[in-house]
Image (cartoon, rainbow, N blue to C red):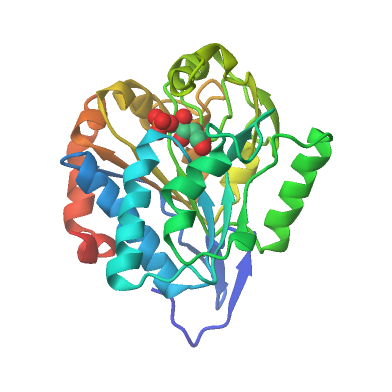
Amino acid sequence: MLDTFNEQIMCFPPDHSFSFSFGRWLDTTLGVELIIRPDRQSASQLVARIVANELRINPRLVLGLATGGTMESVYALLVKEHRESKLDFSQCQTFNLDEYVGLAASDKNSYHQFMYEHLFSHVNIDLRNTHLPSGLSPDLEGECQRYEGMILEAGGIDLQLLGIGKAGHIGFNEPLSALRSRTRVKALAPTTIKQNAPLFDDPAKMPRRAITMGVGTILEARRCLLLATGAAKADIIAQAVEGPITSMVTASALQLHPRCTVIVDEDASRKLKEKEYYRWIFENEPEWESYR
Ligand code: F6R
């Protein structure tokens, strides 16, 4: 714990993982922490509680959002928290990870609609503070630059929610995405098309490209929070967390992040080698005391 009277010079913004205090380097980097919860509901609850706590500590939180089936229960819990415990979204700003190229915001398969349906329409968020890239922009490259600029203008992302695709993507950073990549248009990988096409009335109409925050953009968030549930994610979670850092599994780049919490249910934890160690951390480290 830093002595608050010490003069601290923060270095390497925005991660703030190192501070200089009276001539000593103090490394506050946590790296990846993995937490296993018994089932999908309790894993989602933990994610929602972390988001709610961060929002209560800082009502002007800049929140990075993800879409997809895994996030639906998290948003339902945040809506519940807003209704029952007055969780206040009125001052926060949000930036979503991605949007399909070619879909209007009003399209029922767009991520704009997903967010409106699952979160924005149920809480007291100012819609002008919610941001997703426009998949219909006539100048997609300009749109990507504009999006990066808006994140910068907001002061960077404080807390980034993430899911993981079956091929290991975060956002739509498909295999071989550069680990320093920024927001850009990305061609979707066959695994992603197979995963998401059934959500479209006509699966053949699923767009083949998306605008996505880059791996580098995601790594600049001050804190990352990844949720993975279900046996279908067990292999890829083990690769991402315990395997080598590789652009073939872009979630593995989170190993470079100063503060990334990965929350999984028992099913998604099946292939992890160090499960007992991860369990010990959650049961014993003071950081998790209020969440146990
Ligand atoms: C969506 C996104 C994707 C999903 C991932 C998991 O905004 O960024 O990376 O989080 O594909 O999707 P589900 O939860 O549907 O398995």
**Where does residue 212 sit, x and y in percent of width and height?**
63, 35
Q: In the drawing, does residue 150 fall left or right of residue 204?
A: right
Q: Is residue 191 above or below residue 10?
A: above
Q: Is residue 81 visible?
A: yes
**Where does residue 151 sit, x and y in percent of width and height?**
68, 55
Residue at coordinates 28% horizontally, 39% vertically from top-left?
264
Q: In the drawing, does residue 263 fall left or right of residue 7?
A: left
Residue at coordinates 78% horizontally, 41% vertically from top-left?
143
Q: Please tell me how many numbered marks the rendered image carries.
A: 0
**Where does residue 144 sit, x and y in percent of width and height?**
75, 40
Residue at coordinates 21% horizontally, 64% vertically from top-left?
289
The image quadrant where one finds the C terminus is: bottom left
Q: In the drawing, does residue 287 fall left or right of residue 257?
A: left
| Viewer-closest of 279 and 267 | 267
| Viewer-closest of 103 and 196 | 103
Outermost bottom residue? 5
Residue at coordinates 72% horizontally, 56% vertically from top-left?
150
Q: In the drawing, does residue 33 fall left or right of residue 19?
A: left
Q: Is residue 177 above or below residue 283?
A: above
| Viewer-closest of 34 and 210 | 210
Residue 206, quarter of the rendered image: top right
Q: Is residue 266 above or below residue 57?
A: above
**Where does residue 22 sit, x and y in percent of width and height?**
55, 78
Residue 94, quarter of the rendered image: bottom right
The image quadrant where one finds the N terminus is: bottom left
Q: Is residue 278 visible?
A: no
